[in-house]
Amino acid sequence: MNSKGYTELLSKRIREIPRGDIFVTSDFSDIADNNTVRRLLKRMADNGEIKRVTSGIYYVPKVSSILDEPVPPSPEKVAYALARAYNWTIAPSEGTALNKLGLSTQVPVVWTYVSDGPYRSKVVDGAQIDFKHITNKNVTGMSPTTLLVVQALRALGESRIDRTAIRKIRERLSEDEIDKLVAETGRSTAWIRRAVRRIAGEGADE
């Protein structure tokens, strides 16, 4: 297939992606090899059809109906796009995890994620995204929701896990997610396991 054919296929796929969503070079590995996709995406960015977030990562911006300006990409979407590009497993940590579970109303100054990849820091449109390495045993075998809850519990610390925190976490989870949470934290620290049992309704809060 020639360059024009690849471009048409790539453009068609990108038009199907919701505005504001992030895409990475490897998302189009079924269309062409990595170098070809990189070259075509760069050309589209140079032409103003898409916007480049950072190396190998792009998006089609939403336009604010109020300001009539492109809306910056979500730091969370950028974080997960980076993880997808580098094949990392990540989960929100610290203030990011608390915010996502409704345990804090503060928008994080630094969006922090734990990762089985290397330590890495990125600044995208003024938002700092930090990846902190943790060992595979603390990530492997856990679903994204379980990882999120565990990181939020760690951010709170044992002494700050009260009835309100337990209730807010429980309200965010489906029954299936709670079942997975219990099953996937069987080897976690004892106080994490106790908190999980409370979330599942097996502890003092019921």
Image: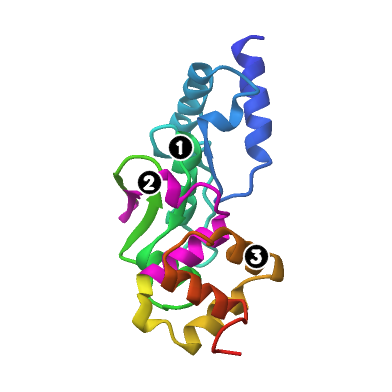
Residue type indicated by callout 1: Ile
| Picture quadrant where residue 182 is located | bottom right
Q: Is residue 200 above or below residue 116?
A: below
The x, y position of residue 145, in whole percent, is 56, 61
The x, y position of residue 159, in whole percent, is 35, 82
Marks 1 and 2, how far apart at CA = 26 Å
Residue type indicated by callout 3: Glu
The residue singled out by tag 3 in the image is: 177
| Picture quadrant where residue 97 is located | bottom left
Cβ atoms at labels 1 and 3 below 8 Å apart? no
The residue singled out by tag 1 in the image is: 57
Residue type indicated by callout 2: Thr
In the rendered view of the protein, which quadrant contains the N terminus? top right
Q: Which structural element holds mark 2?
A: loop
What segment carries the magenta color? 125-154
| Front label number (1 vs 2) | 2
Q: How is the image coloured?
A: rainbow
Q: Is residue 49 above or below residue 193?
A: above
Cβ atoms at labels 1 and 2 below 8 Å apart? no
Instruction: Decide which of 204, 108 is in the foreground and name it.
Output: 204
Residue 117 in sight: yes
Q: Which structural element holds mark 3?
A: helix
Residue 52 on the magenta span: no
The residue singled out by tag 2 in the image is: 135
Instruction: Decide which of 5, 149 is in the foreground and name it.
Output: 149
Which residue sits at x=49%, y=76%?
A: 195
Q: Residues within 10 Å of mark 3 (few under 14, many from 20)?
A: some
Q: Is residue 128 above or below residue 15?
A: below
Which comes before the other along the chain, label 1 or label 3? 1
